[in-house]
Image (tube, rainbow, N blue to C red):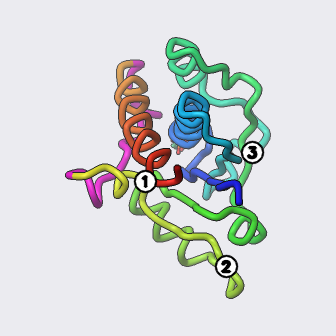
């Protein structure tokens, strides 16, 4: 079965679109067939493209995310995806709290994939400067590489 992975942050305009992009990128490099998407726990930015600093960061690393559009996680996601990864602890708790009784997806914190970084959050770069987005990219790429190995 093709793995299908949903990445979830708060707004779905900074961290989770970058996690989705990095995972697609790493999976493609490894020749692994995957389904990937991202969503937010909040609805503030539904329908909007990613933050332009996120678009620029992904483009710098060779991935176009300008066509991504923010959406909120919904009950069907819990059975449509095989894995749901939260970008931080608040979103992890929120996702688990909202899980419907028929949820089948494995739900985990993204950085739990990275040895030595278990329990850590991918820091929210929204209120910071552009450099924060490079840190986000580094974190989500590292997790994506481990995820591709785990799923291969
Ligand atoms: P994200 O970042 O959860 O990584 O997409 C944020 C985006 C928007 C807001 C907070 C975090 N906001 O408060 O609008």
Query: Does the stretch in magenta take in 3?
Result: no
Residue found at the far top of this picture: 60
Q: For residue 45, which quarter of the picture?
A: top right
Tell which residue pokes out farthest to the left in this image. 116
Query: CB at mark 2 closer than 8 A to ligand 1?
Result: no
Is residue 93 shown left or right of residue 43?
left
Mark closest to the chain's N terminus, 1 or 2: 2
Q: Which residue is mark 3?
A: 46
Pick the front one: 65 or 34: 34
User: Magenta segment, which residues?
Assistant: 116-130
Residue at 75% in and 65% down: 80
**Residue 31 screen position, x and y as percent:** 60, 34
Q: Specify the principal SS of the magenta part.
A: loop
State which mark lies toward you, 1 or 3: 1
Q: Residue at x 38, y 45 (%)?
A: 122
**Inter-mark Cα distance, 1 to 2:** 19 Å
How far, Cα to Cα, is label 1 from label 3?
22 Å
Which element is circle 1 on?
Answer: helix
CA–CA distance between discs 2 and 3? 23 Å
Q: Residue 103 has which mark?
A: 2
* Contact check, label 2 and label 3, Cβ < 8 Å: no
Q: State the quadrant of the N terminus.
A: bottom right
x, y percentage for residue 40?
Answer: 62, 52
Which mark is on residue 131? none
Q: Is residue 118 left or right of residue 124?
A: left
Question: Disc 3 beta carbon < 8 A from ligand 1?
Answer: no
């Amino acid at each position: 079965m093709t793995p299908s992975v949903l990445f979830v942050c708060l707004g779905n305009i900074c961290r989770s679109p970058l996690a989705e992009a990095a995972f697609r990128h790493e999976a493609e490099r490894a020749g692994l067939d995957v389904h990937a998407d991202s969503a937010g726990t909040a609805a503030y930015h539904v329908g909007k493209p990613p933050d332009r600093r996120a678009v620029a960061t992904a483009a710098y690393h060779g991935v176009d995310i300008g066509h991504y559009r923010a959406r909120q996680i919904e009950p069907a996601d819990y059975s449509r995806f095989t894995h749901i990864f939260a970008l931080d602890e608040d979103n992890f708790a929120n996702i688990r709290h909202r899980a419907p009784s028929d949820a089948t997806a494995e739900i985990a914190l993204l950085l739990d994939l990275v040895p030595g970084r278990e329990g850590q959050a991918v820091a929210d770069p929204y209120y910071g400067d552009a450099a924060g987005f490079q840190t986000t990219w580094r974190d989500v790429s590292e997790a994506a590489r481990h995820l591709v190995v785990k799923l291969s």
